[in-house]
């Protein structure tokens, strides 16, 4: 900021009433103030700095003199060698502010010195004058930077002293000549003369010392050298011009020019930079032994010819050697050659012994390992038994394969268990919602199908429809009732054919629940490619004069059911034929639906229709799109025109029972398991998976079996603390759930744990931006990242405009996805006092002056602090106002809260108000921030908190993830190389905590289901985007909700004096819980 002209000194006379005394000058820290009451410093703690004023605990006695003086420390905290952190406009500006404050203080010191000299001039007591000069000398010593001004003032003092001496000598002469003077008077005059002489010598010495001090200042070097005869030998002078600025000195007595001082800050920095390789890379001499390089830093081998002379080198190519000293017994070297396609090498010195050089794999090398190996046409899958991943690159190639389970392109995984047992799994790309598996043990078994979970559970749209669906299924099976039973054969055959539709379909509505897996209709397609189907129901359909259709790409891309037909007629027989689907479908009663078909290669269909509405035919037309494009490019699936004679022919929805099928009674309920697609681990950090995060219902109603080659299964889940002996890589983890009564397995799922190398990113400082809600705003997650980095070879620099010190972030209490995707909330900060029960965030509302506020953030200690609230109704609040907040609902909190100030908080920092769009480049530029390497987005808690059903959460994510995608797109536009991680939040504490936080406003079980549903959708949406540097992290599963949430001591009840530690916050963990969240983020940065 700019520093205004001000005097950092003020005096008051106490009136016995006032406690507060305004500074009227800038001061950022109480420790930078000197406060005196009648020239005496009061006891520490009896006053404080608050709101730009010194406030005493007890009002000073009337008549007391109050002096307040600013005294900025003589030091500089910013280290401008750390360019990433300090050498930016903000820190430099702050440093300059402190410099000008100190200059102002030095001016005040001169003024105070002038007052002392005036006292010296007026005081006839010579002993007191000597004491005053001693005080002046002390002030001069403390204000060396203003020596020129002090010299002028002391010169005045010398002149005064000379006049005083003359007067004293005259008095002595008069005393000698006076015949009436007594001997005692003569002695007194002699003593006075002696004292004055001593004092004169003292002043002369002080002036001499000042005139040769090291702090002389010249505007230019030329002026200083012109005055070199007046500069003492080996004394520093300061040059203030830009080119030659700094400290110079006179090196020899006869020197005619000045020499740059070795104590000049810039000179010292240059010498330090040149000496230490940690600041500036040093070039190695030929024949250097790498074993002898044990000082931290970066060393250059300048050429290939120089590299060949080096001893104990890993490569014959020019490059850079990096050295990191962990401690006195442990040293790390990494050599990066400059040759194309050459690997980087590393080794370790432990207890005096160098390990052999090892090499890193480049990204291209790793990619070559990760990418599946292409399979040639006509390969026999029976012969593919070597461990690895293989890919069939096209559908055309897939049709040539032998002993393959599918005619679609896909990935074949081969897992040899031992010498005689091999497992194969084939997963087709795209539309097939299943994979295939078989095993070899002396001979190959037949391929079996593995349905995706969503497909296996899609028989019933929601549990509420189970009963009616079963009933409808029985009716369809027994042919006693089904949709389309009313249509005659001729009504199904129609009277004409339409053969120009890329997509064709059928639509209707039925008064009963419909269950079916096949369709009897006169539809055909001659293609040899797969034929896909999609079904939309309810609000996803649009009614019109021609029947029901589907409008909008978003809706078309979000069907209720989708799959690949098992069979559809290739030619027309003139009558209805059966179309067999790949799953069972259930549509609720009185729910409109649209069923549409499309060939993958866009071959056109033939579909029957009637030219007029007769008999049982309905007043609607069949569905139609002529656009030869994929589903994602379709903007509408409309209808032919009913009024033009295109009447939809009749069709039937039936249940086909496969021959020789068994009848297995299904369990009443199959739990759905929600496990993150990948977890990240690091040596020395506990990796946890707590079961409460993985199930919609209480995990305690099941038995559990967790399988992993590392770690331990515990009562509540899984824990593993990797050590240095664990191999870096990926470890599969599986989890199965069993019925507690019968012991039957109900469901299972699997994931991966990726163990990062402890030496990954050695010597690097990664920059991270953490965006989120109150979980981030608490500051614990980001502080833990900094704490871990202290002892890691990889360092972390946090980016953000909120937080304190190095702990920066962009967390805001109460914020949602939509807030960060748009302009943000209208939030206000209230300074409050006298609070007994803090309000619950995202729950309790208060009113003031016709406005309603929802509490979003609370920071109260001892009854005082602040709350942040969003304005939910009413006009903008009056800033700076004071008043009373009155509770408006039944949420937790005092009935009234007094506040003394209202402050408007900034809105979305990523929103460019001039363009009305997200602009991360502007955010970085405006705030002078470095471009982050990682961006974490921790949101969702406030979004789903108040939703009342799983379906409501699922519906919310459709819109929310579009907004989240827009945030990610904006980030990628500004920083295309950044890795972006969307973080799934943890579930909450128990009902005691929710009761304490929200009264009866929310339940722990509903909140848990909301979060598990949200996380399930989050994993599905972002799990396959790592190639775009977009990741989804399940770090929330590592939070212990039973032990790492806040607690408070409460009595059992009013008739029992026993107490218990009851959880007291439903959503926000205690510090250990926040730390567990970070324990999933830091390993991710090491691993990616």
Image: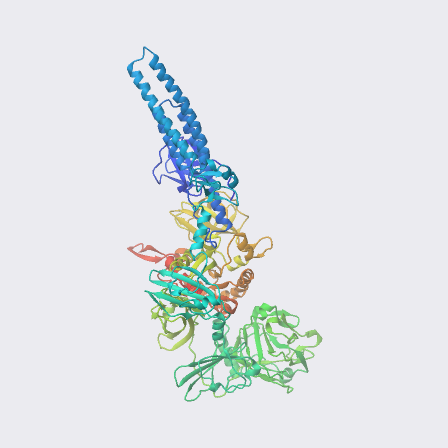
Farthest-out residue, front: 254
Q: How is the image coloured?
A: rainbow
Relative to residue 513, is residue 35 depicted above or below? Answer: above
Q: How far across and down, in percent of the image, does residue 792 sit?
A: 39, 61
Relative to residue 494, is residue 52 depicted above or below? Answer: above
Q: How far across and down, in percent of the image, does residue 278 sit?
A: 43, 57
Relative to residue 736, is residue 569 depicted above or below? Answer: below
Relative to residue 1084, is residue 627 depicted above or below? Answer: below
Q: How far across and down, in percent of the image, does residue 871 sit?
A: 51, 51
- Tell me the residue at 58%/57% (across/down): 917
Residue sitting nearer the eye, 709 or 379? 379
Q: How far across and down, in percent of the image, does residue 339 sit?
A: 50, 69
Residue 640 visible in the current orientation: yes
Residue sitting nearer the eye, 424 or 585? 424
- Tell me the residue at 69%/79% (across/down): 611
Farthest-out residue, top: 180
How many numbered discs, if any? 0
Answer with left or right where residue 824 lies relative to residue 1061.
right
Residue 78 visible in the current orientation: no
Residue sitting nearer the eye, 944 or 409? 409
Residue sitting nearer the eye, 267 or 540? 267
Answer with left or right where residue 484 lies relative to residue 290.
right
- Tell me the residue at 46%/48% (across/down): 266
Answer with left or right where residue 62 lies relative to residue 515.
left
């Amino acid at each position: 900021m700019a520093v205004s002209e001000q005097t950092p000194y003020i005096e008051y006379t106490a009136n016995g009433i006032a406690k507060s005394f305004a500074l009227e000058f800038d001061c950022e820290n109480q420790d930078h103030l000197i406060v005196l009451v009648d020239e005496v410093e009061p006891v520490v703690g009896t006053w404080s700095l608050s709101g730009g004023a010194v406030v005493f605990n007890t009002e000073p006695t009337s008549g007391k003199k109050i002096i307040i003086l600013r005294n900025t420390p003589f030091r500089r905290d910013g280290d401008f060698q750390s360019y990433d952190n300090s050498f930016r406009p903000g820190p430099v500006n702050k440093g300059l502010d402190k410099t000008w404050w100190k200059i102002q203080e030095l001016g005040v010191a001169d003024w105070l010195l002038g007052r002392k000299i005036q006292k010296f001039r007026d005081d006839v007591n010579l002993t007191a004058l000597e004491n005053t000069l001693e005080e002046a000398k002390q002030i001069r010593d403390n204000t060396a930077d203003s020596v020129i001004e002090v010299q002028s003032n002391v010169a005045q003092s010398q002149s005064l002293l000379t006049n005083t001496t003359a007067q004293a000598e005259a008095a002595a002469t008069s005393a000698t000549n006076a015949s009436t003077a007594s001997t005692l008077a003569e002695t007194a005059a002699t003593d006075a003369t002696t004292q004055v002489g001593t004092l004169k010598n003292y002043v002369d010495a002080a002036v001499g010392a000042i005139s040769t001090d090291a702090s002389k200042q010249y505007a230019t070097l030329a002026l200083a050298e012109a005055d070199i005869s007046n500069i003492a030998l080996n004394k520093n002078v300061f040059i203030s011009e830009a080119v030659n600025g700094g400290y110079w000195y006179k090196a020899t007595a006869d020197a005619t020019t000045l020499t740059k001082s070795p104590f000049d800050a810039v000179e010292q920095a240059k010498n330090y930079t040149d000496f230490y390789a940690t600041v500036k890379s040093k070039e190695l001499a030929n024949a250097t032994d790498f074993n002898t390089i044990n000082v931290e830093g970066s060393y250059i081998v300048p050429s290939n010819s120089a590299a060949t002379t080096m001893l104990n080198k890993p490569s014959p190519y020019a490059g850079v050697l990096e050295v990191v000293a962990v401690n006195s017994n442990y040293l790390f070297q990494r050599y990066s050659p400059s040759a194309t396609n050459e690997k980087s090498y590393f080794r370790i010195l432990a207890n005096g012994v160098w390990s052999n050089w090892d090499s890193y794999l480049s990204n291209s090398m790793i990619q070559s390992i990760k990418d599946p190996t292409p399979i040639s046409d006509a390969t026999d899958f029976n012969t593919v038994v070597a461990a690895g991943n293989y890919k069939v690159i096209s559908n055309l190639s897939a049709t040539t394969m032998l002993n393959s389970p599918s005619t679609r392109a896909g990935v074949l995984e081969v897992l040899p268990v031992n010498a005689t047992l091999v497992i194969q799994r084939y997963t087709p790309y795209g539309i097939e919602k299943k994979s295939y598996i078989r095993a070899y043990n002396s001979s190959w078994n037949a391929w079996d199908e593995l349905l995706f979970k969503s497909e296996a559970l899609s028989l019933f749209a929601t549990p509420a429809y189970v009963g009616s669906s079963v009933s409808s299924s029985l009716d369809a099976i027994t042919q006693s009732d089904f949709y389309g039973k009313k249509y005659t054969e001729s009504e199904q055959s129609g009277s004409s054919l339409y053969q120009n539709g890329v997509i064709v379909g059928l639509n209707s509505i039925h008064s009963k629940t419909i269950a079916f897996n096949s369709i009897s209709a006169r539809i055909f397609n001659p293609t040899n490619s797969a034929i896909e189907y999609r079904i939309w129901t309810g609000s996803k359909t649009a009614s019109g004069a021609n029947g029901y259709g589907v409008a909008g790409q978003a809706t078309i891309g979000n069907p209720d059911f989708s799959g690949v037909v098992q069979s559809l007629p290739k030619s027309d027989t003139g009558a209805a034929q059966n179309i067999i689907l790949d799953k069972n479908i259930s549509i609720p009663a009185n729910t409109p639906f649209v069923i549409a078909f499309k060939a993958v290669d866009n071959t056109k269909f033939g579909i029957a229709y009637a030219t007029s509405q007769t008999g049982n035919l309905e007043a609607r037309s069949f569905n139609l799109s002529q656009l030869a494009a994929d589903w994602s490019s379709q903007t509408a699936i409309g209808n032919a025109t009913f009024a033009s004679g295109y009447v939809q022919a009749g069709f039937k929805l039936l249940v086909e029972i496969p021959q020789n099928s068994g009848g297995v009674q299904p369990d009443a309920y199959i739990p759905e398991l929600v496990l993150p697609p990948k977890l990240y681990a690091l040596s020395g950090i506990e990796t946890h998976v707590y079961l409460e995060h993985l199930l919609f219902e209480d995990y305690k109603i099941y038995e559990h079996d967790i399988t992993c080659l590392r770690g331990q299964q515990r009562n509540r889940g899984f824990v593993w603390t990797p050590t240095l002996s664990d191999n870096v890589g990926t470890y599969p983890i599986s989890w199965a759930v069993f019925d507690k009564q019968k012991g039957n397995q109900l469901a299972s799922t699997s994931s991966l744990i990726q163990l990062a190398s402890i030496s990954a990113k050695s010597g690097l400082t990664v920059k991270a931006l953490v965006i989120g809600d109150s979980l981030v705003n608490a500051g614990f997650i980001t502080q833990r990242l900094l704490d871990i980095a202290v002892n890691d070879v990889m360092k972390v620099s946090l980016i953000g405009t909120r937080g304190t010190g190095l702990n920066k972030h962009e967390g805001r209490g109460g914020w949602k996805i939509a807030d960060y995707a748009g302009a943000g909330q209208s939030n206000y900060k209230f300074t409050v006092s006298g609070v007994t029960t803090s309000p619950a965030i995202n729950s309790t509302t208060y009113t003031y002056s016709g406005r309603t506020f929802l509490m979003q953030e609370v920071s109260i200690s001892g009854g005082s602090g602040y709350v942040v609230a969003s304005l939910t109704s009413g006009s903008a609040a009056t800033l700076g106002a004071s008043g009373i907040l009155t509770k408006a609902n039944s949420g937790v909190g005092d009935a009234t809260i007094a506040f003394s100030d209202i402050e408007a908080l900034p809105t979305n920092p990523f929103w460019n108000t001039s363009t009305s769009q997200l602009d991360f480049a502007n955010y970085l530029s405006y705030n002078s921030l470095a471009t982050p390497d990682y961006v974490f987005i921790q949101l969702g808690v406030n979004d789903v908190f108040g939703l009342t059903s799983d379906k409501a959460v699922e519906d919310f994510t459709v819109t929310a993830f579009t907004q989240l995608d827009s945030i990610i797109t904006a980030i990628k536009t500004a920083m295309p190389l950044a890795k972006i991680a969307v973080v799934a939040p943890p579930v909450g504490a128990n009902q005691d905590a929710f009761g304490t936080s929200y009264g009866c406003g929310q339940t722990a079980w509903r909140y848990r289901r909301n979060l598990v549903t949200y996380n399930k959708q989050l994993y599905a949406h972002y799990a396959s985007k790592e190639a775009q540097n977009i990741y989804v992290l399940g770090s929330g599963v590592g939070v212990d909700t039973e032990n790492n949430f806040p607690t408070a001591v409460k009595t059992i009840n009013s008739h029992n004096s026993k107490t218990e530690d009851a959880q007291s916050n439903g959503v926000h963990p205690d510090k250990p819980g926040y730390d567990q969240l970070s324990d999933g983020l830091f390993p991710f940065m090491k691993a990616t």
